[in-house]
């Protein structure tokens, strides 16, 4: 597990806390009951239900560990009030050769959701626009080649 800092909105932080609480209480109990039932079926070496329950338990504990680590090191970001692009900024960019601009909010990797217009600051475009200002042009390397974007607005 890594203790790198994760940037989260207050809303996402609360959502992850709620998920962690559910996993540690209700879900852990369900998995323990499945494991106990599978044990009661007998020979554990050839018991597929037991193996599946063990895998569920391992996945659950891994997710709990990840959430605990993430929440422990999380930095809550609010909407930015600076001219420079930072995590939390909403940015309007125009891709070279296109007519329509695109609006993105720069977020931490756990919150990224392209359909909702939220890109991670680790993503190629997110990394390229970090620290830039309105009017700047950035170059992003993509599988289709180099793409140029002009920053039209930073909120």
Image (cartoon, grey):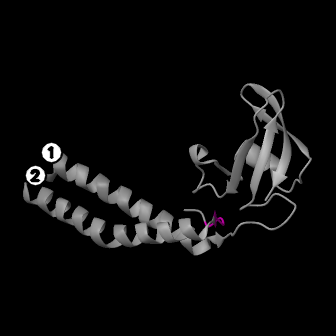
Give me the residue at 39% from left, 73% from top: 21
- The verdict on residue 65 being magenta is no
Discs 2, 1 touching: Cβ within 8 Å: yes
Q: Position of residue 114 (x, y in %)?
A: 60, 44
- Mark 1 lies on a secondary structure that is helix
Give above or below for 82 relative to 152. below
Q: Residue at x 17, y 49 (%)?
A: 49
Checking the image for residue 135, the label placed there is none
6 part of magenta stretch? yes
**Residue depicted at x 83% and y 51%:** 153
Quadrant (top left/top right/bottom left/bottom right) for the N terminus:
bottom right
State left or right for residue 44 relative to residue 90: left
Residue 101: name its quadrant: top right
Q: Which residue, given by chain and number where applicable, does mark 2 sit on?
A: 43
Range of magenta residues:
3-7
The answer to whether residue 122 is visible is no
Residue 122 falls left or right of residue 42: right
x then y, percent, for residue 68: 49, 71
Q: Report the front residue among 2 and 68.
A: 68
**Res. 101 visible in picture:** yes
Residues 148 and 53: in front is: 148
Dot 2 falls on a residue whose secondary structure is loop
Quadrant of the drawing holding the C terminus: bottom right
Q: Main secondary structure of the magenta part?
A: loop
Position in image of residue 100 (x %, y %): 75, 34
All told, the count of numbered labels is 2
Q: Residues within 10 Å of mark 1 (few under 14, many from 20)?
A: few
Q: Residue furthest front?
A: 99
Frontmost residue, 28 versus 102: 102
Residue 31 is left or right of residue 76, and the answer is left
| Residue 46, disc | 1
């Amino acid at each position: 597990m890594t203790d790198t800092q994760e940037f989260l909105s207050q809303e996402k932080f609360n959502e992850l806390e709620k998920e962690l609480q559910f996993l540690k209480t209700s879900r852990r109990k369900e998995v323990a009951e499945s494991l106990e039932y599978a044990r009661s079926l007998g020979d554990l070496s050839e018991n597929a239900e037991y193996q599946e329950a063990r895998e569920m338990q391992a996945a659950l504990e891994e997710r709990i560990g990840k959430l605990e680590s993430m929440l422990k090191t999380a930095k809550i970001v609010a909407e930015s009030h600076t001219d420079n692009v930072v995590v939390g900024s909403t940015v309007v960019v125009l891709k070279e050769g296109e007519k329509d601009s695109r609006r993105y909010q720069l977020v931490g990797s756990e919150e990224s959701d392209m359909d909702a217009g939220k890109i991670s600051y680790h993503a190629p475009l997110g990394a390229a626009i970090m620290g830039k200002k309105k009017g700047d042009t950035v170059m992003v390397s993509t599988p289709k080649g180099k793409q140029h974007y002009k920053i039209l607005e930073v909120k």
